[in-house]
């Protein structure tokens, strides 16, 4: 059976592997990765599946995704199970195959993310300190805006930037673990008006202007600037000579300069 991905709707394809052990029928389900799913069980399991390319054969896509998620290539015939449409609009085409698999031999696909040492340390340390005590043991579906409020309130004023980063990191992690087509899901870490109104009021920041360079020191400064290499130094000299706006100089091209 050849099933094509509908061109106007996002689609996925997957395979339900099953085997017969005496009178019992056993199926293979997989579990998503990520820190929020690590210790979760109920409602987290599904068949190995993934996105289909445009006009791709669903059976071929299902075999590819099964290989990527388990490390095992299937050669047996697939039995079409039909198609379901998820709440967000995505269509999932499923197949079944009778086969046996050594679960100890499963090796899921993986990828590497390049982070600087600073950011690599900041993400887990900030979440461990400020987020885990409140939401570390919760499923994504169990996290409520009130939980985000509880963990942000103690640091919202005193540690402004830390609070902003922690909230943003939680929002990002949750978003990456939710189906992009699930339009009914509302990220509980989103900085909504309700959340802003409940959090303590932050005092306005006092604007501190940089002191002006004394005119007597300008010749020495310009001499040093003229000897500096790089585009930034050249742009600063142009900015001083022309009194243009910074954004105009940054976005300008050579065709605009006589």
Image: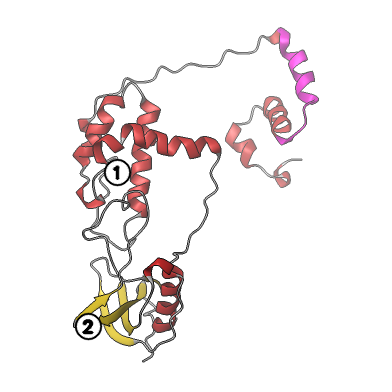
Residue 22 is labelled as 2
Along the viewing direction, whichever of 4 and 20 lies nearer the viewer: 20
Colour mapping used in the image: secondary structure
* Residue 193 in sight here: no
Instruction: State the residue at coordinates (26%, 50%).
Output: 140
Q: Is residue 19 left or right of residue 146?
A: right
Magenta span: 216-231
From this viewpoint, is residue 14 visible?
yes
Q: Is residue 17 left or right of residue 124?
A: left
- Give the residue drawn at x 26%, y 65%: 88
Side of 196 relative to 104 (left or right): left
The residue where tag 1 is placed is 190
Q: Nearer the viewer, residue 89 or 239?
A: 89
Q: Cα distance, mark 1 to mark 2?
A: 50 Å
Instruction: Tell me the quarter of the picture where residue 42 sits.
Output: bottom left
Residue 54, placed above or below residue 137: below
Q: Is residue 35 above or below residue 23?
A: above
**Sequence-wise, which precedes: disc 1 or disc 2?**
2
Q: Secondary structure at mark 1?
A: loop
Q: Position of residue 257 (x, y in %)?
A: 73, 41
Instruction: Tell me residue 93's x, y (percent).
Output: 32, 79
**Answer yes or no: do the residues labelled 1 and 2 have beta carbons within 8 Å?**
no
Left or right: where 133 falls relative to 160 = left
In what quadrant of the picture does the N terminus appear?
Answer: bottom left
Dominant secondary structure of the residues highlighted in magenta in the image: helix
């Amino acid at each position: 059976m050849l099933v094509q991905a509908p061109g106007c709707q996002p689609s996925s394809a997957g395979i339900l592997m099953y085997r017969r052990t005496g009178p019992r029928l056993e199926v293979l389900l997989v579990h998503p990765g990520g820190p929020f799913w690590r210790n979760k069980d109920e409602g987290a399991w599904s068949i190995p599946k993934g996105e289909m390319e445009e006009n791709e054969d669903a059976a071929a896509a299902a075999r590819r995704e099964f290989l990527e998620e388990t490390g095992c290539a299937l050669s047996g015939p697939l039995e079409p199970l039909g198609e379901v449409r998820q709440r967000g609009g995505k269509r999932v085409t499923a197949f079944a195959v009778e086969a046996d698999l050594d679960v100890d031999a499963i090796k899921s696909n993986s990828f590497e993310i390049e982070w600087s040492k600073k950011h690599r340390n900041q993400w887990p340390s900030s979440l461990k300190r400020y987020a885990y005590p409140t939401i570390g043991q919760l499923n994504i579906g169990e996290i409520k805006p009130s939980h985000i409020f509880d963990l942000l309130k103690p640091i919202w004023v005193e540690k402004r930037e830390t609070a902003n980063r922690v909230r943003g990191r939680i929002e990002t992690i949750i978003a990456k673990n939710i189906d992009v087509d699930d339009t009914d899901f509302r990220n509980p870490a989103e900085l909504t008006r309700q959340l802003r109104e409940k959090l303590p009021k932050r005092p306005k920041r006092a604007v501190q202007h940089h002191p002006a360079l004394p005119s007597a020191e300008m010749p020495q400064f310009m001499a040093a600037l003229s000897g500096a290499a790089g585009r930034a130094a050249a742009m600063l000299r142009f900015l001083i000579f022309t009194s243009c706006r910074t954004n105009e100089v940054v976005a300008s091209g050579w065709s605009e300069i006589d």
